[in-house]
């Protein structure tokens, strides 16, 4: 990062907060601050659990509770505990809240039109394209990669999506029972690890390491959701796994891949992996790679 980049981000933040009225107490003229209105948008017509809201909006529990209590006092929101698990609380819009959401949506459309209206058509498209690019890059910046239990719900979800994609892409389909798939238990610390990539509370990627020997780690189950591809997350996940491998004192990372996964082959080669002779009997593999860690 350079000083000019930091200064540009700060300048952009200032103009956005001023333009959208983030500092005002009557966002879109509705006599409430932006935080409360944003929470109404996020609860939406279908409702949401409090934990989902906290993750999506990046709010701490205390502040979110205060926002919800304020909206409850305005008769816009109701909250209740789950009948099956009293630790799970859900929020839903009341009839008045649904009407308020409709008003906010109309106001948001009118506000967007007020930004576009002074521009000519070329400028409007330039602004829309620039906003799409900023949204894409901010999403990439918001992704967190964390170690998680390989047997947890998030890991099982990612692995199942990975298997579903392999079934669609492999010429012969994919049957996990025929693969040399390590059991999820083999990713357990201290000699293994499983990483999950999260975006706004949703798991969108994964990757794991298991031991082959005291020197070598076996990289498996690396997957990035199609909806966030093109953001450099696969390379970021790969670097994170290599960093963890180094921290666990491995000096070598090995992996294999299928011939149809051409983008994965390109990623590995451009990341310093060398193609080697087969080191296992994985029936779905056509290419074997390894990398010596510095």
Image: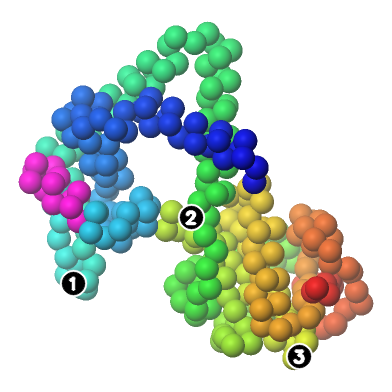
Say which of 109 and 284 sits in front.
109
Q: Position of residue 27 (x, y in %)?
A: 25, 30
**For the residues bearing labels 2 and 3, Cβ distance under 8 angstroms:** no
Residue where numbered disc 1 is placed: 86
Q: Point out the tag, 2 or 3, that comes first from the N-terminus.
A: 2
Q: Point out the tag, 1 or 3, that comes first from the N-terminus.
A: 1
Residue 232 disc label? none
Residue 213 disc label? 3
Instruction: Give the quadrant of residue 211.
Output: bottom right
Q: Is residue 247 above or below residue 98?
A: below
Element carrying mark 2: strand
Q: Is residue 72 above or below residue 16?
A: below
Q: Residue at x 68, y 71 (%)?
A: 243
Q: Is residue 217 left or right of residue 225?
A: right
Is residue 51 part of the magenta span, yes or no? no
Instruction: Give the quadrant of residue 116.
Output: top left
Q: Position of residue 93 (x, y in %)?
A: 18, 45
Q: Is residue 161 visible?
A: no
Say which of 66 and 223 sits in front.
66
Q: Residue at x 66, y 79 (%)?
A: 247
Marks 2 and 3, how far apart at CA = 33 Å
Residue where numbered disc 2 is placed: 199
Marks 2 and 1, how far apart at CA = 26 Å
Q: Which segment is the magenta one?
A: 65-76
Marks 1 and 3, how far apart at CA = 46 Å
Is residue 69 part of the magenta span, yes or no? yes
Instruction: Give the quadrant of residue 273.
Output: bottom right
């Amino acid at each position: 990062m350079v000083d000019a980049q930091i200064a540009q981000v700060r300048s952009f933040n200032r103009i956005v907060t001023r333009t959208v009225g983030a500092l005002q107490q009557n966002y879109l003229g509705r006599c409430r601050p932006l935080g409360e209105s944003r929470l109404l948008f996020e609860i939406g017509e279908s409702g949401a659990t409090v934990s989902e809201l906290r993750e999506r909006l990046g709010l701490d529990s205390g502040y979110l509770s205060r926002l919800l209590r304020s909206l409850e006092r305005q008769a816009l929101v109701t909250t209740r505990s789950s009948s099956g698990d009293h630790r799970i609380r859900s929020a839903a819009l009341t009839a008045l809240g649904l009407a308020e959401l409709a008003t906010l949506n109309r106001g948001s459309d009118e506000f967007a039109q007020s930004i576009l209206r002074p521009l000519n058509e070329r400028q409007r498209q330039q602004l829309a394209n620039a906003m799409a690019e900023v949204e894409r890059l901010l999403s990439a910046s918001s992704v967190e990669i964390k170690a998680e239990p390989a047997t947890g719900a998030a890991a099982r979800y990612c692995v199942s999506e990975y298997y579903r994609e392999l079934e669609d892409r492999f010429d012969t389909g994919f049957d996990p029972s025929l693969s040399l798939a390590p059991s999820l238990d083999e990713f357990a610390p201290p000699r293994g690890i499983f990483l999950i990539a999260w975006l706004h509370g949703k798991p969108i990627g994964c990757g794991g390491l298991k031991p082959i020997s005291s020197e070598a780690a076996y990289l498996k189950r690396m997957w990035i959701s199609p909806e966030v591809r093109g953001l450099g997350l696969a390379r970021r996940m790969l670097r994170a796994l290599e960093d963890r491998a180094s921290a666990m004192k491995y000096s070598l990372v090995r992996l294999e891949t299928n011939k149809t996964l051409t983008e994965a082959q390109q990623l590995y080669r451009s990341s310093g992996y060398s193609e080697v002779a087969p080191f296992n009997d994985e029936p779905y593999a056509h290419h074997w790679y390894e990398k010596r860690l510095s």
